[in-house]
Image (spheres, helix red, strand yellow):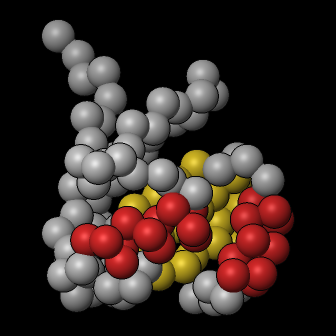
Amino acid sequence: MKIKGFGGVFLRSKDIEKLKNWYEETLRISMGDWNGAIIKPDADNETVFSLFKEGSSYFPVEQPVMLNFQVEDIEGWIEHFEKIGVPLLKEPEKTEYGTFVWISDPEGRWIELYEK
């Protein structure tokens, strides 16, 4: 037996329509009438499952989960965010794992994007 991958990410929302529209405009994730989208990963995509200490400052301590999306053309994403007025939460970081940027959704959840 083995884990094949994550089956989904589920978020609660105070305003589903607003959040759904934000994800479509900001991250280009078009959600259907069922308030969801199926994202089929590319062959070189990897999903990381990682645990952080309760007091870690990597993302806000009041936020129990952070979304991370692997992307192509991170510079293009940064330009897109600038164009639509979505600020980066901190400067992009380049590490041996890739380049990372952070934004937040309208409900304050941090979202991390990275490019290998």
Q: Total number of numbered labels? A: 0
Q: Is residue 1 above or below residue 3?
A: above
- Looking at the image, residue 56 lies above or below residue 28: below
Give the camera-side residue of 44 and 9: 9
Classify the position of the N terminus by image quarter. Answer: top left
In the picture provided, is 10 more to the left or to the right than 24?
left
Residue 23 appears in the rendering: yes
Residue at 56% from the left image edge and 62% from the top image edge: 27
Left or right of 9, for residue 18 = right
Residue found farthest to the front: 33
Name, please, the residue furthest toward the top: 1
Q: Quadrant of residue 105?
A: bottom left
Give the quarter of the image for residue 64.
bottom left
Q: Position of residue 68 (x, y in %)?
A: 47, 58
Q: Dividing the picture into quarters, in which one does residue 58 lie?
A: bottom left
Q: Is residue 96 visible?
A: no
Position of residue 95 in the picture relative to residue 86 (left or right) = right
Residue at image location 67% in from the left, 88% down from the top: 85
Q: Nearer the viewer, residue 64 or 84?
A: 84
x 69%, y 81%: residue? 84
- Horizontal relation, residue 13 to residue 58: left or right: left
Task: Give the vertical position of 39 relative to 28 (above or below).
Answer: above
Horizontal and vertical percent for residue 37?
Answer: 38, 44
Closest to the observer: 114 or 57? 114
User: What percent of the width, then of the height, locates residue 104?
Assistant: 47, 81
